[in-house]
Amino acid sequence: MTTPPSGDDSLYELEVEVSEELTLAESSRPEEIADLPVTEWLFDPADAERDEAGLHGLLGAIQALEED
């Protein structure tokens, strides 16, 4: 994670939030949930994988903006 640029803490705060969400998404272990019967799912594993991919993309975009 990068340090906040002078005068613009909002981008840094967004990076922290997205990083935290990504940590939660990665810890959900959707591949293990998919092995359970559907009636025991608390979330759809495919949705979790899409969310994780989206968070990776968002984090990359934030980091690219910080480099500019």
Image (spheres, helix red, strand yellow):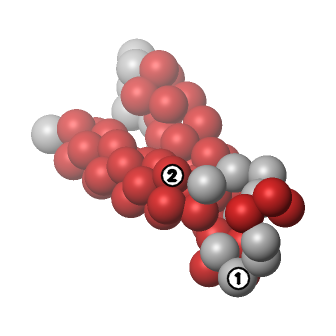
> Vertical placement of 14 versus 35: above or below?
above
Mark 1: which secondary structure? loop
| Front-lying residue, 59 or 46 | 46
Q: Residue 5 — which label?
A: none
Name the secondary structure under disc 2. Answer: helix
Residue at image position (65%, 75%) is: 34
Furthest toward the left, the residue is 68
- Give the labeled residue for mark 2: 47
C-alpha separation, residue under disc 2 versus residue under disc 1 = 15 Å
Please identify the quarter of the rendering in which residue 8 is found. top left
Q: Residue at x 60, y 37 (%)?
A: 17
Q: Is residue 1 left or right of residue 59?
A: right
Image location of residue 48, percent across then percent down: 56, 56
The amino acid type, in three-letter code, at marker 2 is Asp
Residue at screen point 70% across, 82% down = 35
Task: Judge whether 12 appears above or below 49 on screen.
Answer: above
Dividing the image into 4 quarters, which one contains the C terminus? top left
Number of marks: 2
Q: Is residue 40 above or below residue 5?
A: below
Image coordinates for residue 61, horizontal then vertical, percent: 25, 44
Placement of 12 over or under 40, stated as above or below = above
The circle on residue 35 is 1
